[in-house]
Amino acid sequence: MDCVRFAVANLKGGCGKSTLALNLAAGLTARGNTVLLDADPQGTLVHWINFEDIEGMPRVIAIDSDLPETMRQASDANRFIVVDCPPALGSGNTETALKQVDILLIPVLPSPPDLWGSARMVEAVREARQENPRLRAYFVRNQVESRSALSRAMRQALKTCELPVLESALGRRAAYRWASLEGISVYQFGARGKKAVDDIESVIEEVLNND
Ligand SMILES: Nc1ncnc2c1ncn2[C@@H]1O[C@H](COP(=O)(O)OP(=O)(O)O)[C@@H](O)[C@H]1O
Ligand SMILES: [Mg+2]
């Protein structure tokens, strides 16, 4: 089977790129060989590298230069690749990743500045599609509080962007923070990670069944 390549990107720092990338990669690891490429030079994920021997954690590779070549090699040996992108556009790893991946996930927080920042991502997707016409891109709402009017308003606002918004979202949950502090994904977090695992599973199923 062909390798399915994901990128997780947005211009804003702190919107949950690394959180989504790591937990997505952990969820995919249960479905097939998965490698997580940390393409953010200030990479958060590098801190997780020492923990890659933990059962169920994806392999993590820090990218210093040659992302395209690393992706090519990883595509041969893996069922899934997840690229955690830096919070930047402009001749960097984000554009490179967008030209090569099958699926882009754009995490967004329920706040107006985050929404404005993501308009640039819509443009970046349009550009990337000139070289990579099959690129599928979705917004993923992060830190959603289910009863929050803001989260609902946010969902409406995102619908006016030209990219689809996943039905599935990541709730605002302490498990994501605790798991990252302990250097694991929510899948290794036992009962305390259950709701977060449900979030991630639902993202994975929605995206994989949506092509
Ligand atoms: N759904 C969530 N619930 C609770 N905390 C979250 C959630 N998503 C991210 N965080 C926390 O927010 C902070 C920023 O997330 P991170 O994934 O590092 O963002 P980015 O990679 O986009 O800079 C981290 O401390 C992370 O643990
Ligand atoms: Mg990050």
Image (tube, rainbow, N blue to C red):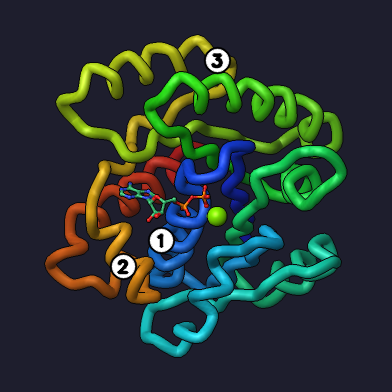
Neighbor class of circle 1 (other Cα within 10 Å; few <14, some 14-19, many 20+) is many
Q: What residue type is labelled 1?
A: Asn
Left or right, residue 62 beside residue 25: right
Q: Distance between the residues labelled 1 and 3?
A: 26 Å
Q: Nearer the viewer, mark 3 or mark 2?
A: 2
Considering the numbered disc 1 on the image, is that residue within a helix, a strand or a loop? helix
Q: Distance between the residues labelled 2 and 1?
A: 10 Å
What residue do we see at 74% from left, 30% from top?
A: 124
Give the camera-side residue of 30 and 46. Answer: 46
The residue beneath circle 3 is 161
The residue beneath circle 2 is 179
Disc tally is 3
Give coordinates of residue 101: x percent, y percent.
69, 49
Considering the numbered disc 3 on the image, is that residue within a helix, a strand or a loop? loop
What residue do we see at 65% from left, 44% from top?
A: 87
Q: Quadrant of ligand 2?
A: bottom right
- What label sits on residue 23 in the rendered view? 1
From the viewer's perspective, is residue 153 above or below residue 171?
above
Identify the mark nearer the N-term, 3 or 2. Answer: 3
What residue do we see at 73% from left, 46% from top?
A: 94
Residue farthest toward the bottom in the current orientation of the protein: 53
What residue do we see at 46% from left, 19% from top?
A: 112
Q: Nearer the viewer, mark 2 or mark 1?
A: 2
